[in-house]
Amino acid sequence: MIDIDKIMKALPHRYPFLLVDRILEVGENRVVGLKNVSINEPFFTGHFPDEPVMPGVLILEAMGQVAAMMIVCRPNMQNMVTYLTGVDKARFRRPVRPGDQLITTAEMVKSRGLMGKVKARSGVDGELAAEAEYSFFMAERLSKKEAMEERI
């Protein structure tokens, strides 16, 4: 299991865009993570006030972040960051609501050099909520100082 402190060391995302709370299993080609969906999420104030559902694009983002953990937890990838290059075959099967626990399983489909493809599926209470294939590339993470210098 990987807790939120280790997730925050591995991923560059921060509130309100960090959408994975815990990694339950991680291997070289498979990862399982979870997102506790709370009514306190900022997006619920506008999506939709009388019928709150997690926006599909944020479900896709949560799935992508879980998938990224599989990659950046590899021994030779600790200083890497993944960048999304494509999303294919995205399908939404059921709404995700406050109080749900979104469980995502991601598996490596193909990896070549710094590029790859991952297949991810998310569910609530064992029922499929969403699925998609992600293409990505990896790059070395910049230090905060390097990032600031690059912006100037």
Image (cartoon, helix red, strand yellow):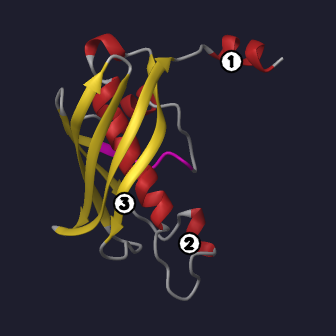
Picture layout, residue 60 above or below residue 72: below
Front one among 102 and 22: 102
Q: Name the residue that disc number 1 marks.
A: 147
- Residue at the spot 22% in from the left edge and 68% down from the top edge: 128
Q: Position of residue 26 (x, y in %)?
A: 20, 33
Residue 14: assigned label: none
Q: Position of residue 143 (x, y in %)?
A: 60, 13
Q: Name the residue that disc number 3 marks.
A: 90
For the image, the number of numbered tags is 3
Is residue 151 at least partly visible in the picture? yes
Q: Amino acid at mark 1?
A: Ala
**Helix, strand or loop status at disc 1:** helix
Closer to the camera: disc 1 or disc 3?
Answer: 3
Marks 1 and 2 sit apart, C-alpha to C-alpha, by 32 Å
- Residue at the spot 27% in from the left edge and 19% down from the top edge: 74
Which quadrant is home to the C terminus? top right
Q: Residues within 10 Å of mark 1 (few under 14, many from 20)?
A: few
Is residue 21 at least partly visible in the picture? no
Q: Residue furthest right?
A: 152
**Is 51 positioned to the left or the right of 64 in the image?**
right
Q: Magenta segment, which residues?
A: 17-22
Which quadrant is home to the N terminus? top left
Front one among 20 and 83: 83
Q: Name the residue that disc number 2 marks.
A: 44
Marks 2 and 3 sit apart, C-alpha to C-alpha, by 22 Å
**Is 45 positioned to the left or the right of 7 in the image?**
right
**Helix, strand or loop status at disc 2:** helix
Q: Amino acid at mark 3?
A: Ala
Closer to the camera: disc 1 or disc 2?
Answer: 1
